[in-house]
Amino acid sequence: MKQMIAVLILCIVSAGASAQSVAPPAAGSARVERAMQQLQMRFANANTTRDGKLTREQAAAGMPMVASHFDEIDTQQAGYVTLAQIEGFMRQKAMAR
């Protein structure tokens, strides 16, 4: 859980804010929920086209950590990533530690 928080905070620290809703972590603490809200806000701010998809350029401008791992997150090579993909990537990294 602490590793997940650390990964979430790393992502949060890397960019700007606004809101987009997703389900909070099932058994998360208030701190994890706040971190998830911050992630959602940063994603929404970076997503200047408001289409729920973050391009590499949008990530570079608003979420540098996501930009640095863009190819790892964009497993389908679609040229964009979604909030769900970013969250999945972060969970995967947290579990690997």
Image: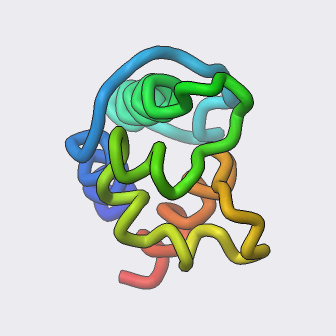
Quarter holding the N terminus is bottom left
Q: Is residue 86 visible?
A: yes
Q: Position of residue 75 (x, y in %)?
A: 70, 76
Using the image, determine if residue 43 lies above or below residue 96. Answer: above
Using the image, determine if residue 97 lies above or below residue 69. Answer: below
Q: Which residue is pictured at 57% across the width and 41% down the height?
A: 27
Q: Which residue is pictured at 36% across the width and 52% down the height?
A: 60
Using the image, determine if residue 18 lies above or below residue 51. Answer: above
Q: Which residue is pictured at 67% across the width and 48% down the height?
A: 82
The quarter holding residue 7 reads: bottom left
The quarter holding residue 52 reads: top right
Left or right, 87 with respect to 4, comes to: right
Q: Position of residue 41 (x, y in %)?
A: 45, 23
Left or right, 53 with respect to 18, comes to: right
Q: Position of residue 34 (x, y in %)?
A: 38, 25
- Comparing 64 with 83, the one in front is 64
